[in-house]
Image (cartoon, rainbow, N blue to C red):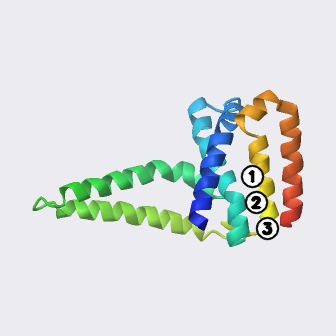
Amino acid sequence: FSIGFMLSYGVVFAIFTLSTPLKIALSKVMPLKMASTLSVSLAAWIGSMPLLIYFFKTISFFSIVVNILMVPFVGIVFMAMFSTLLISWIPGTSVIFVVSEFLYKVLNFVVDGVASFKYATVSMVGSMATVVLIFMALLLASDYIFHKYKYVASSCFVALSVITMVIAGVA
């Protein structure tokens, strides 16, 4: 499988298994809408983390915050670009190209700016065992198992996380 396919699968798997338990936990300390948004972003980060460690030997901790801030803006940029595409055949609408291009440049500027932070990415070492252990931990933390076997799943999740960090050379 390609790296892109594995990343997509890992992110979707993590969102499917972790977003609800994370939302429930986060909703105790923040408004539900914010908890819902943060839980999806955090689940996506967790789902991509083991594969990013394995294939690229790096991990980004800023991506969670950047996702929360930039996803609504990305929606605006894509809507502007799509609108530009739809009306591009009409004479005299070239000014809309300038707006779409400007929004796209702002998006790239912010993303490049965050990527240039000193600790935007952290180098790590990981093996395929790391990937397997993290995805096993995700499965144990899934909504069904978490609610049915709450304490067992929590204990296994913590234990697998510690084992994974040791294997990855973090601890």
The answer to whether any part of residue 170 appears in the image is no
**Mark seen at residue 126:** 3
Rounded to the nearest angstrom, the CA distance separating label 1 from label 2 is: 6 Å
* Count of number-bearing discs: 3
The answer to whether the residues at label 1 and label 2 have Cβ atoms under 8 Å apart is yes
Q: Position of residue 112 (x, y in %)?
A: 52, 69
14 up-or-down from 171: above or below = above
Residue 68 x, y percent position in the rendering: 56, 48
Choose between 87 and 11: the one closer to the eye. 11
Mark 2: which secondary structure?
Answer: helix
Q: In which quadrant will I find the N terminus?
A: bottom right
Considering depth in this image, is 38 or 159 the residue closer to the camera?
A: 159
> Nearest the camera: 55 or 76?
55
Residue 51 in picture, x, y percent from top left: 69, 62
Q: What residue is disc 2 on?
A: 131
Residue at image location 12% in from the left, 58% down from the top: 90
Quarter of the picture containing the C terminus is: bottom right
Separation of residues labelled 1 and 3 (CA atoms): 13 Å
The correct choice, above or below, for 145 with respect to 67 in the image is above
Q: Do labels 3 and 2 touch, CB within 8 Å?
A: yes
Location of mark 1 (residue) = 135
Q: Nearer the viewer, mark 3 or mark 2?
A: 2
Residue 25 pos. (x, y %): 72, 33
Q: Amino acid at mark 1?
A: Phe
